[in-house]
Structure formats: C-alpha cells, structure tokens
Amino acid sequence: MHIKSLFYFFKEALRGIVRNGWMSIASMGVVSITLLILGSFVVLSFNVDLVTHDLKEDVQIVLYIDEKANEGTRAVLHSKLVAHPQVSEVRFVDKEEAMGRLKEKLGDRSRLLEGYEKPEDNPLRDSYELRTSIPEEISAVAAQIESYPGVAEVDYGSGVVEPLFQFTGLVRWIGLAFMAGLAVTTVFLIAHTIRLTVYVRRKEIMIMKYVGATDWFIRWPFLFEGLILGLIGAVIPVIVIFYGYQAAALWMRSNIYFVSLLPPEKIVEKVVKILLPLGVALGIVGSTISVRRFLRV
Amino acid sequence: MIEIHHLYKKYGSDVHVLEDINLTIDRGEFVFVVGSSGAGKSTLLKLLLREILPTKGFIKVFGRDITRLRKREIPYFRRNIGMIFQDFRLLEDRNVFENVAFSLRVIGVSTREINKRVPLTLKLVGLQDKALKNPGELSGGEQQRVCVARAIVNRPAVVLADEPTGNLDPNTSMEIMKLLHDINVRGTTVIVATHAKELVDYFQKRVVVLEGNRVISDRERGVYLNAY
Ligand SMILES: Nc1ncnc2c1ncn2[C@@H]1O[C@H](COP(=O)(O)OP(=O)(O)OP(=O)(O)O)[C@@H](O)[C@H]1O
Ligand SMILES: [Mg+2]
C-alpha cells in the first residue's frame, strides 16, 4: 500500500465519518461507554489486587498447641508442619513471646496483665504462625492441620479472607459478562454505521467498480472508518479515566489514609495498553462485518 | 479485438435474453447496437464489461477469454474499457474536474499525472471552462460530456456507451454522438447501444440489430431497421 493511497483512504474515511454525523457520534459513544466501563473495572481490579495483595501478606494460620502435649508430640507436630507442601513458613511463638506482644498491644492498659507475668502464671499458650504458599488455600490447609497431634485450636481469620476473595472473583465475572454484551453492541453499531456509509457511497462504489478500482482499494476506506471510530472511542475513556482517577486518588489520599492506590500515571499506562488495541479491534471487526455483508466487492 | 462466440445468456432459469450471438469487432470500429426495448442490448454491454457472466459461450477481448478472468483480474481488465451511461452517474458532491479525476485516482494514478491528463480530456470534450462547476450546475449535454471525459481519460482501447443520448434532446444528442465519433476517429473502438434512429442513419456506421434474442442483421454502413 502506497503512502499516497493511505492518505486517500484516511481522507475518505474521515469524509464518511463526518457525513454520517450523528451515527458516527453514536458509535463512538457506545465504544467509549463500553471501554469506559471496561477501563473502570481494570482500574478497580488493579487496586483491589493491590489491597488484597497487602491483605494476603497478613493472612496467616495461628495454631495453638495443646498444653498437655508432651515433647514427643510437639516434635512430631513440628516435623509434620515443616513437611506440609503448602506451608511456606513455620514460626514458633512461645507463650512468653505472646505475653510480650500482648503487653505491647495493650500499651497503657498493660496493668491489666499484672499477676499473670510469671511464666508459671502465664495463661497464654505456645503457638505456631504459618503462611501458605497460596493464600487462597488457607482454609483447606487449616482444616488439615486441625487434625494433627497436639493441636488445641487453629485460627486463620476466616470470615474476613474468604468473602474478600469471593467478592473480587464475583466482581471480575460480572464485569466480564457485562463487557461481552457491550462489545457485541459496539460491533453491531459500528457495523451499522459503516453500512450507512456504504449506502451513501453506493454510487461512488459502483463507479469505482466500472473504472477498475480493485476490491481492496474500495474496501480500505471503510475499514479505516471503523478503525478511526474505534480509536476515537477508546481515546475518550482513557482521558476520562486519567482525570477521574487523578481526582479520586487525590480525594482518597486526603480522606482515607490507609488505602494505598496505584499512581495515576501507572494506571493510565495499563488502561491505554488494554483500551486502545481493544477499540481498534472492535472498530475493525465492525467494519469487516459491514464490508463483507454490504459491500459485495 | 472483440470476439463473441455462441454466446447465450438467460436470467434465472427461463428468461432467455441472448441466444447464439456471434460477433467480431475489430480495433478502431464504430458499432451501433440497436433493437427494441428488452432485446438485450444492455445485457450485451454488461457481458463485454464482465459485469455479468454468460450462460454459455465465450467472449475474447484483446485475445483473452474474459469469461475466465479471475475475480482479482477483473478490475485490471476494466481499466481498458470506458463506460458511458444514459443517466450519467456523476458524483454530485464533486466538481467536474474531480469527477473525471476520480476514475484515475481510484486506480492509483499520481496527482501530477491527473493534473496533466484531466485538463486535456476536458478540453477534448469542450468543457475546459466548466472544470470547477458541480454537475448540478450543468446542462444534460454537458453532464454527458463529463461522463464521456471520465470514460476516456484513462485512454481505454474500447468505449461502451449504453443509450448515451437517451436523456438528451435531438441537438444535444447529435453533439454527443459527434463527440463519440471524434473519439473513434482518434483510434478508440466505440460500441453504442441506442434507440436514436436519426443518429444511426446519419452516421452510416456498422449496425448490429438484436431482436428475438438473436442478431438478425449486421451491416457495414447500415441503417436503423424499421421492421418493428
Ligand atoms: N438482472 C436481471 N434479472 C432478470 N431479468 C433481467 C435482468 N436484467 C435484464 N433482464 C431482462 O432481460 C431482458 C433484456 O434486458 P436488457 O436490459 O438487456 O434490454 P435492452 O435491450 O437494454 O432494453 P432497453 O432498450 O429497454 O434498455 C429484459 O426482458 C429484461 O427484463
Ligand atoms: Mg438497455
């Protein structure tokens, strides 16, 4: 393809877009809305990932040892924990250390602990702190470990972790389903817009065929038209997301300190990488459908 | 240059339009194709342009059987043939220059070449002063001249005209036919399907009469038959 022809196709495509006016705006609008929703999900899921990642770091199993367990049982338990394939980290916390932590936690109110300080009066139990290599498997691992010898109790912050994982999974699936529906609508609308151009330009197309323009020469402007519609439709949500996110991040920083968000530049980079190719792809798929069904060249 | 052998064309399964047509047209000939409405004149021209395929038989143009052209060869074949229509088929949103240039642009001719050839062609058809007018601002005869210019600007070996004067008054029709005659004198083969009896009789060229699905007469220096 010549540069000159490229320029010609581009010009013809723009002509088509301008001529179709509202229809072009509608298709770009639908592309924009689809990609804006997709983009928002992307932003959300990157940040949820970040937060859950932080949370996952904190997720651990605490295993309390039965006070009545003898040295032999304890040794067996230790070796079984170390040998467990899903357990990535094993840390023993004796009851003195536990008492120390508790004191620190209570701070000013540590006087409450007076009278329990001597080792023989310490009501706390020795324990293990375990991490699993895959955070999502924590409950399964905890269930297995519960039956090990010398185990009094297993605690892993259930009730917090699992719903969170379930929630992020759900959000992702709903988002995907929603997006698939919108993508189909988008392709349909672009195809319809291009069809309108084909219709408006049927006389030109007929003349082109009579004077010997090649089929591809006739097709390219329509493919370009779809491509441009998709591309503009993708650029709009990128801009909206960038400024929207910047404002949101600013607000979050000054109002909710403890949540750390990805910086806007990073988000935009990720969003651009997803939205632009997708917009172009939607545009090309839409125009290809139209060219194949209505152009008949 | 054009050989038509035992050509049959039917539309659908029972509309027989052409049956056993045999014709040979040499380089530089001027041929009128006449016949009553529905005789198959337009169908014959469409076959020559490879717009449609025959049911049987073959058509050789420049020594090549065009019924066997591959799909992607068709555009290149058509660049050797100029087509003129009764209804002009000009692009209303472009001026005369651009209408003529259009047929060169879409086959990849350079702008420089276009700027050279289009004015020459417009001069040839007598429209050098109307280059920047839109088709809507022209008379019927002038519009048909634009159509002629568009058909010949690529210097095709053959020009096909389907009732080029059908929408024009007698005087203007004569002018257009003279223009086609000029083009023929310059070496282009011209085939004109027409109902214009006076013009056919005036020019005394070869006349092929289509009637009842067949060629019933084919004479040099012929006249329009009054048989129907
Ligand atoms: N696409 C088509 N499908 C079916 N029948 C067709 C088609 N095109 C033409 N015909 C029929 O074929 C016959 C010949 O048509 P054609 O247009 O070739 O005639 P013509 O000689 O050009 O007539 P006219 O002088 O009125 O232009 C007519 O009876 C017409 O109805
Ligand atoms: Mg006809």
Image (cartoon, rainbow, N blue to C red):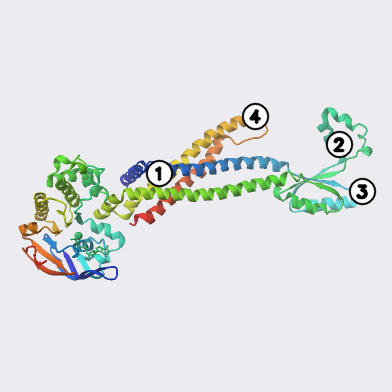
> Quadrant location of the C terminus of chain A?
bottom left
Taking the image as shown, residue A231 lies to the left or right of residue A204, namely right
Q: Residue at x 33, y 46 (%)?
A: A9
Q: Residues within 10 Å of mark 1 (few under 14, many from 20)?
A: some
Chain ID at mark 4: A
Find residue A255 and name its label.
Answer: 4
CB of mark 3 within 8 Å of CB of mark 1? Answer: no
The nearer-to-camera label among 1 and 2 is: 1
Horizontal side of A79 relative to B200 (left or right) equals right
Q: Amino acid type of disc 1? A: Met
Residue of label 3 = A68
Mark 2 residue type: Met
N-terminal-most mark, 3 or 2: 3
What's the distance in space between the residues labelled 3 and 1, CA to CA? 79 Å
Check disc 1 and report the residue beneath it: A23
Element type at mark 4: helix
The residue at which mark 2 appears reads as A99
Quadrant of ligand 1: it is: bottom left
Q: Is residue A136 above or below residue B8?
A: above
Nearer to me, B25 or B31: B31
- Disc 2 chain ID: A
Residue at the spot x=83%, y=35% of the render? Answer: A102
Question: What is the C-alpha distance between the residues marked 2 and 4?
Answer: 35 Å
Looking at the picture, do discs 1 and 2 lie on one chain? Answer: yes
Mark nearer the N terminus (4 vs 1): 1
Alpha carbon separation for disc pair 1 and 2: 71 Å
